[in-house]
Image (tube, grey):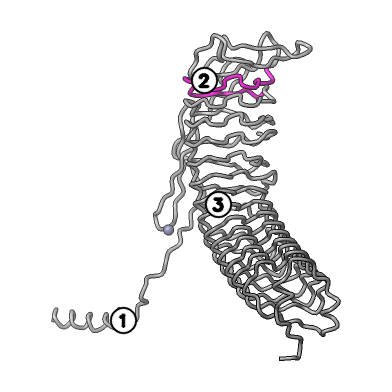
Amino acid sequence: MKRIVAALIIFILIPLVSCAPDTPPVHEHSFGEWTAVKEAACLEEGLMERVCACGEKEIRTVPALGHEVSGAVCVRCGKKASKGLKYTPGEYFDCYTVTGIGSCRDADLVIPESFFSKPVTGIDENAFRELSGIKSVSIPESVKKIGRYAFYGCKDLMILGIPDTVIEADSCAFSNCTGIVSLRLPLGLIPVGGGTFSGCTGLKNLIIPEGVKNAGAGMFSGCTGLASVSLPDGIDGGWGFSGCTSLTSVTFPADAKVIWSGAFAGCVSLTEMKIPEGITEIGGGAFRRCKGLTSVFIPGSVTSIGKEAFKECEALESIVVPDSVTVIGDSAFEGCSGLKRAKISGNLTVIGQRAFVDCSSLEEVTIINSVTRIEARAFRDCKSLKSVVIPDGAEYIGYEAFFNCGALESVTLGSGLKKIDQRAFYLCKNLKTVRFNGTFEEWQKIEIEDFNSPIRNAEIIFAGQE
Ligand SMILES: [Zn+2]
Ligand SMILES: [Zn+2]
């Protein structure tokens, strides 16, 4: 009897197995809220986790809080504020600024809220610059301004306790503090100069909480240990992650309209960039020199691609500029030496200066009819370009626009053309035929400036003549 049952089971199972899909369905984790496993303390990191229904857990560390100074002690642990620091009084002796370490030897530097009964409102430029031995810095709410290079190069510094009140941080205030691994960006920190945390190469765990308005002015540029960044909603004062060479993942705010200028320049580990729907402007140099970028998706909400936005993205093979785009800035795709295909659709009227200069692999470019001007050097040195069709709406081909496009064999010029500027087709040594979508009379009215012998010497085929 057992054997029969077994046989039956096999009989039933076989068709089931053969009907099963070739690959099991991919389960995408859906994590719940982050919950604290261990609360962070003044000098100790905390732990949080979130769990998927399948049991998979994600864990992240919470940066140590630093001391929360009120008066001269920490309200959490009772640690006393540092003594022996150097101060300078304000103009009216109503406040003090910390100017240096003085005789203090604390590894845990706790700036007091007041000195001689007057509030401590600032930390002077260079105050603790390149001091070793400082492991943590805690700053009280009374401080409103941190001067430039105040903690620059404090290589032993690991923990920053900065309150969420408004504090202006001048240039490079915490630059090159290579020991900081975990950081929660304080809500009110305003980068008045550039590069607040630039060159903090040890930084791996960056938490930008909701409520932060500004992470701009190169705030994290050159933080080469940072692999992922998650930007909260409402952050609109710039994003500064240039030169974060390990960055592979970016989570954009759901309400973002702009990819800020220079935001991800030189982030060579970014390989794919899906710009989210809703973005209207890709800022100047936003992805400049992202040399690992092989694909970019530009959504239909984008109207403007800034100057140098994708300059020298050498691995990029194709680009589709959607209908919504009305501006391609100067040098937007300059030096994209791997770019083979560019499709420009939509309502664009001007192809900016140097927009595609030096795209030495570009074989195919489609230019739509709304384009009226092709500016200077737009396609200069595009050495693989074999043919190009200039639409009827185009009136102007700029200086050196197709200079040194040595592979160019055929050019179609639109009937609306009024001027070909100097050297526009200079050194296009293979240009033999030019098709013109107009009459001989119209051709004769086109102003062709000097150094355009390839055009002058080419066989001109007029519309309807073929
Ligand atoms: Zn799961
Ligand atoms: Zn404490």
Q: Is residue 445 above or below residue 331?
A: below
Q: Quadrant of residue 393?
A: bottom right
Q: Nearer the viewer, mark 2 or mark 1?
A: 2
Q: Is residue 115 above or below residue 452?
A: above
Check disc 2: other Cα within 10 Å, few if <14, some if 14-19, many if 20+. Answer: some
- CB atoms at circles 1 and 3 under 8 Å apart? no
Identify the residue under disc 1: 18
Helix, strand or loop at mark 1: helix
Q: Could you tell me which residue is drawn at 58 percent across and 44 percent down?
A: 241
Q: Could you tell me which residue is drawn at 47 percent across and 19 percent down?
A: 133
Q: Nearer the viewer, mark 1 or mark 3?
A: 3
Q: Split into 4 quadrants, where in the image is the C terminus?
A: bottom right
Give the residue type that dot 3 points to: Val
Helix, strand or loop at mark 2: loop
Q: Split into 4 quadrants, where in the image is the N terminus?
A: bottom left
Q: Which residues are magenta?
A: 120-141
N-term-proximal mark, 2 vs 3 = 2
Q: Is mark 2 within 8 Å of ligand 2?
A: no
Check disc 1: other Cα within 10 Å, few if <14, some if 14-19, many if 20+. Answer: few
Identify the residue under disc 2: 131
Nearest the viewer among 63 and 9 is 63
Q: Nearer the viewer, mark 2 or mark 3?
A: 2
For residue 19, side relative to residue 83 (left or right): left
Q: Quadrant of residue 170?
A: top right
N-term-proximal mark, 1 vs 3 = 1
Nearest the viewer among 266 and 182 is 266
Find residue 284 and report its horizontal and vertical position in percent.
68, 51
